[in-house]
Image: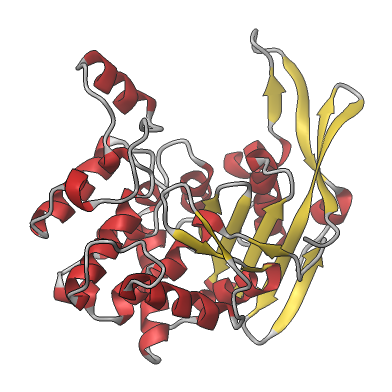
Amino acid sequence: MGQAQSLVEIWRGAICESQHRGHAVIWDSGGDIVASWGDPQAVILPRSSCKMLQALPLVESGAADAFGLDEARLALSCASHQGAKVHTDMVRAWLDELGLDPEAALRCGPHEPYDKQTANDLIRAGQTPCQVHNNCSGKHSGFLTLTRHLGAGPEYLDLDHPVQRAVLAAVEEATDEDSPGYGIDGCSAPNHACTMTGLARAMAKFSAATGDGDVRDKAMFRLTRAMAAHPVLVAGEGKACTNLMRAMEGRVVVKTGAEAVFVAIVPERRMGVAIKIEDGGTRAAEAVATQILVGLGVLDANHPAAVQYTHGPILNRRGINTGHVKPIEALAGWSL
């Protein structure tokens, strides 16, 4: 990874206690870098920030239409959800319509739901989390739908499986790069590396999609529209992706990924944004993303969500304000 730049400071009183370094790229669909911080050519694993890329074959193949997937399920196929009832009920219904037993068909593995109410309900009922609670179960339901449509075998996460071959092709075509390698994600799916510029370029292509072009354009438009229409399905109550998309009233799509990756699709600017914080600090990725959205003129700097993520107070156990988050001046002072 190339030389990172300090992007976010953490202040405690009058002392800068910590700094988060990273990379950020804004790409115009016309083919140029609008602005960048750090190394635009840094190679990263996009993690869950690229789920809309992984969902492209689901739509382009005709599987989404063949199985009657509505916008809500398309949004869920791009989600890192909280495992709340609104998410798990939809996954169960989706797989039931495919005639699949979630525990037998899914390959994402179980984990405790991130939604606290759901987690507590499981404990009270003496139940254990299952694979449906996995934050990637929507994406995997999409993979299973595509698998059924293609008539392929059940091990849909294998690199040489038709589903994963289609995903790799979509990633490389959208980023305009040959992926230099891959890692295995937390949900066991292959995650293909790309450059910061490649990821931003892919998001810019989504931003420029009109729904009137070729198969790829139509798929990108549908997925973007679905995510914008269902922010709570993409993440969940209280999460940055949901809060920010609601704050921008569907004008922009944002998606986080593990280890502090963050992307934005900005249709009215026909631009894409990619962010990676080197130390994996999510709070910094959220701060950078929010500040860039303010600079692009698509998020009001005074909106409570914008204030929360860019200058949010750091409270101690007694609720005392001990410090705050602060994007660097070169970022906070930038605007288009």
Q: Is residue 172 left or right of residue 326?
A: left
- Picture quadrant where residue 117 is located: top left
Above or below, 205 relative to 261: below
Who's the residue at 63% across and 41% down the image? 282
Q: Is residue 141 left or right of residue 283?
A: left
Who's the residue at 46% across and 81% down the image? 209
Q: Residue furthest bottom?
A: 214
Position of the N terminus by quadrant: bottom right
Q: Residue furthest right?
A: 14
Q: Position of residue 30 (x, y in %)?
A: 65, 87
Q: Is residue 289 left or right of residue 129?
A: right
Who's the residue at 59% across and 74% down the image? 179
- Picture quadrant where residue 113 is located: top left
Asked whether residue 221 is in view, the answer is no
Q: Position of residue 86 (x, y in %)?
A: 26, 41
Position of the C terminus by quadrant: bottom right
Above or below, 18 relative to 270: above
Q: Position of residue 105 (x, y in %)?
A: 20, 52
Give the total of numbered labels.
0
Front residue (pair 207, 84): 84
Front residue (pair 83, 190): 190
Asked whether residue 18 is in view, the answer is yes
Who's the residue at 65% across and 63% down the image? 274
Q: Position of residue 68 (x, y in %)?
A: 15, 69
Q: How is the image coloured?
A: secondary structure
- Picture quadrant where residue 183 is located: bottom right
